[in-house]
Image: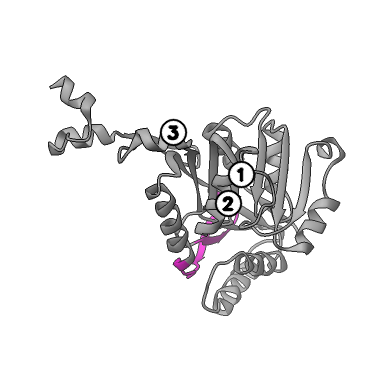
Amino acid sequence: MALVIDPAGNEVRALAQATHWRGKRVLEVGCGSGRLTLRLAHLGAARIDARDPDAKLIHTARKNLPKRYAHCIEYHFGEAERVGHQANTFDLVVFSWAL
Amino acid sequence: MVHALHEAHRVLKPGGVLVDLRPAPKHRRVGLGERKRWRLIGVMREKFDDDRAADHAVKRVLREGLFYPGTRAAFEADRVMDTMQDFREWLDDFIRLGKTMPSHTWFVERLERALKKERAGTKIVVRGPMMLNVMRKLGDAAIGSLGNRRPPQQTITAWSGARRLVRSEMKVGAAVLSGDVAGYPEVRSLR
């Protein structure tokens, strides 16, 4: 599928302006195939736990994960209501089309 | 939605940031050609029930005092596609991600007819704003001290990066204008 999302880069600019990402531990809810996850890693997030309730999309995301981000991104299958992490774990939580 | 926000509040560190990124509740505009050559073909008729439900969920957790509002931004995020097949797949994904919509067969046919008249290589571009809502988690101590007051909220609206409007909503200022300064001791001391 030849689909280019936001070629002008407005999304990354808005995210970069919204808060500080460098060195932060991030939970991304609704990561889908990992498009936004890679952008968050590019913004400097130290570690990203990305999850989506669609197992097929998680499989795609894992397959498409570049080696340079393999150390900082982990994809999980799961619902937003039960993240399964301890309290007070993340610096940032991103709902990506998930609300 | 509220349960997901409560879970986010639980796993966030005190002072942590919640970012809510989703399409703004505006109808997507679909056209042909990129940038200045973009020509509108039609406007989609998606429904916004889910968006309203999400807004209510956000308002509820703000009312509960779990978060306080921070920056809000809106920006254009084009979806550029090469073929009609790409558009159909995008539309399927759009619906799968939760957009409730009546049948858009008529729309797909109209777009297909228009695309046939264009020269080869013409792109299909879907336009519509995205919105980004940033909230900060309040610690237990902060919730108690804040009471019913809210910190200032900043709204940033950026359309295609061309126009930018920054507006600060000062709740204390609003209270001064309305004369209702009972809950704001710092305002009383200025008078």
Q: Considering the numbered disc 1 on the image, is that residue within a helix, a strand or a loop? A: helix
Q: Are marks 1 and 2 in contact (CB under 8 Å)?
A: yes
Residue A9 colored in magenta in the image = no
Can you tell which mark lies on residue B7? 2
Residue A22 pos. (x, y %):
66, 28
Whichever of callouts 1 and 3 sits on the residue coming sooner in the sequence is 1
What residue sits 53% from the left and 32% below the top?
A17
Q: Which residue is mark 1?
A: B11
- Answer with left or right where residue B120 lies relative to residue B14: right
> What subunit carries mark 2?
B
Q: Residue A43 sits in which quadrant?
A: top right
Q: Are marks 3 and 2 in contact (CB under 8 Å)?
A: no
* Residue behind mark 3: B141
Magenta span covers which residues?
Answer: B28-49
Three-letter amino acid code of the residue under disc 3: Ala
Q: In this rendering, which labeled residue sits more in front, label 3 or label 2?
A: 3
Q: How is the image coloured?
A: one colour
The chain letter for the residue carrying disc 3 is: B
Looking at the rendered structure, the kind of residue marked 1 is Val
